[in-house]
Image: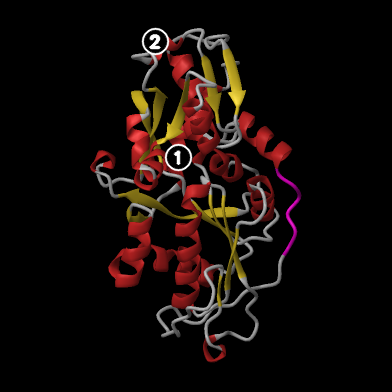
Amino acid sequence: MKWPSYRDKAHQNMDTLRSKPALTVPEFGQPVARNTSSPLTAKPRPRFQPKTLSSLKVISIQSENADDTCRHMTQYLGEQLGIETEFIDAIPWQEREHLLDTQQAHLGWICGLPYIWKADREHPHVELVAAPVMQNFRYRQQPIYYSDVIVHKDSDYQSFEDLRGASWSYNEPHSQSGHNITRYHLAKRGEYQGYFGRVIEAGSHLKSLELLLENNIAATAIDSTVLETEFAARPYLREQIRVIETLRPSPMPPWVVTKNVPPPLREAIRQVFLSMHKTEEGRAILKQGQIQKLARVDDHDYDSIRDMAQLADQVKW
């Protein structure tokens, strides 16, 4: 079932697609050379390089604390397939998403909310590859995650109910975990406007976290996997913030591939990702990102985000 409101948003947010040169790929499973030259670009030895293959460009619009994992996954993918890969991260996330929307980038790790906008277009230009299953036991070995509502440790807030009239920050409007699910949660409570006293669009989860630590806001909702990654990098944060509520699970942000990539290469990419946890090098890369494995996902797995967005769209900050 297709929701007109999503399709309208997609047409507003995405440019006309431009065709790209055809890509070819060697037969999946062909041995490739190990490359250690650059963390950004994997360039296998020429004897494994198909003659007509252009660079496979990869982007992420996840939190910046996932960039190192994405960079190593990109290199791993190139080495396994015997193709040149490039991870693009030196431009704002909006520009990276534009590259995916215009099929100038071919593979991307994106949020579930923009995924449904892209998938529900009349002529979708991306298809699902896989989604991470995180290591933490709270995810029950499923490709799901949560939105953790956090406050400063010194605040008096004990629950979401206490936040009426308080200041709030969200990362950006294309986010399921920071924006869409919060408005859905408000709609389920019958709160359609003015619940928070002041609302700030911070630009990213990490910026919302910094606003909270500096006592510039009272609370925010953060992607649980982003928060766990920050806890691992900065353990002292556990002593500075408190989780007062966890909002319902959402399907994990998926990896998608553009349809100007030839079908054999699309499937080869999928198989590399799905089997990544079976190799020593692949497991090491996934562990860096606190990922257990990558799992196959289907479009209907994201129907819950479609349902949440229907309610969320009724809420105004």
Q: Where residue 150 sits in the image (x, y, percent)?
A: 40, 25
Q: Secondary structure at mark 2?
A: helix
User: In the image shown, does 75 or 212 lie closer to the viewer?
Assistant: 212
User: In the image shown, does 162 or 115 lie closer to the viewer?
Assistant: 162
Location of mark 1 (residue): 302
Queried whether the magenta region covers residue 277, the answer comes back as: no
Q: Where residue 209 sits in the image (x, y, percent)?
A: 48, 32
Is 289 located above or below residue 167 in the figure?
below
Label 1 is placed on what type of residue? Tyr
What crowding class fits label 1: few (fewer than 14 Cα within 10 Å), some (14-19), or many (20 or more)? some
Is 282 located above or below residue 311 in the figure?
below
User: In the image shown, does 202 or 122 lie closer to the viewer?
Assistant: 202
Q: Which residues are magenta?
A: 14-19
Q: Residue at x 37, y 39 (%)?
A: 145
Nearer the N terminus, badge 1 or badge 2? 2
Determine if residue 89 is in view.
Answer: yes
What crowding class fits label 2: few (fewer than 14 Cα within 10 Å), some (14-19), or many (20 or more)? few
Determine if residue 308 is in view.
Answer: no
User: What secondary structure predominates along the stretch shown in magenta?
Assistant: loop
Location of mark 2 (residue): 161
Label 2 is placed on what type of residue? Glu
Q: Residue at x 63, y 43 (%)?
A: 121
Camera-side mark, 1 or 2:
2
Q: Quadrant of residue 281?
A: bottom left
Q: Where residue 22 sits in the image (x, y, percent)?
A: 66, 73
